[in-house]
Amino acid sequence: MPKGWRAVEGGVELRVKAQPRARRAGLAGWIDSPGGPRLKLAVNEAPEDGRANRAICALLAGALHVPPSAIAVVQGATAREKTCRIAGDPARLSEQLETLA
């Protein structure tokens, strides 16, 4: 299966599919989507005033051991399918993303 992320200068861009207002927050693994694989994740927050996006950044930060400020939603801020940019060493982040599979 192709990867759901790509290395960019200064980090990686990760494709995710969000489930806001979930009963249980957490990572749900890789899923297939029409645009390619995405990391499915669930957050308890509602998709209002950017709360779900902040929760997504915090969840990814905990899983990848980076500060929440190193993660930003760069595409799809109001959609369930998003692209997040994670600042850091692309090689190290790629290794960590491999372990999430």
Image (tube, grey):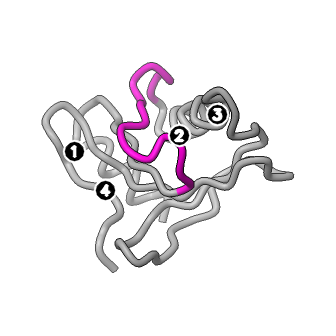
User: Which residue in the structure is indicated by mark 4?
Assistant: 5
Q: Earlier in the sequence, mark 3 or mark 2?
A: 3
Q: Secondary structure at mark 2?
A: helix
Q: CA distance from mark 4 to mark 2?
A: 13 Å
Q: Residue at x 39, y 24 (%)?
A: 70
| Mark in front: 1 vs 2 | 2
User: Which residue in the structure is indicated by mark 2?
Assistant: 60
Residue 79 is covered by the magenta coloring: yes
Residue 8 is covered by the magenta coloring: no
Q: Residue at x 45, y 64 (%)?
A: 38
Considering every residue shown, the one lying at the far right of the view is: 23
Residue 39 lies, with reference to residue 75, above or below; the image says below
Q: CA distance from mark 1 to mark 3?
A: 25 Å
Residue 81 or 88: which is nearer the viewer?
81
User: Which residue in the structure is indicated by mark 1?
Assistant: 91
Magenta part of the chain: 66-80
| Mark in front: 3 vs 2 | 3
Kind of residue indicated by mark 2: Leu
User: Which residue in the structure is indicated by mark 3?
Assistant: 55
Residue 48 lies, with reference to residue 76, above or below; the image says above
Q: CA distance from mark 4 to mark 3?
A: 20 Å
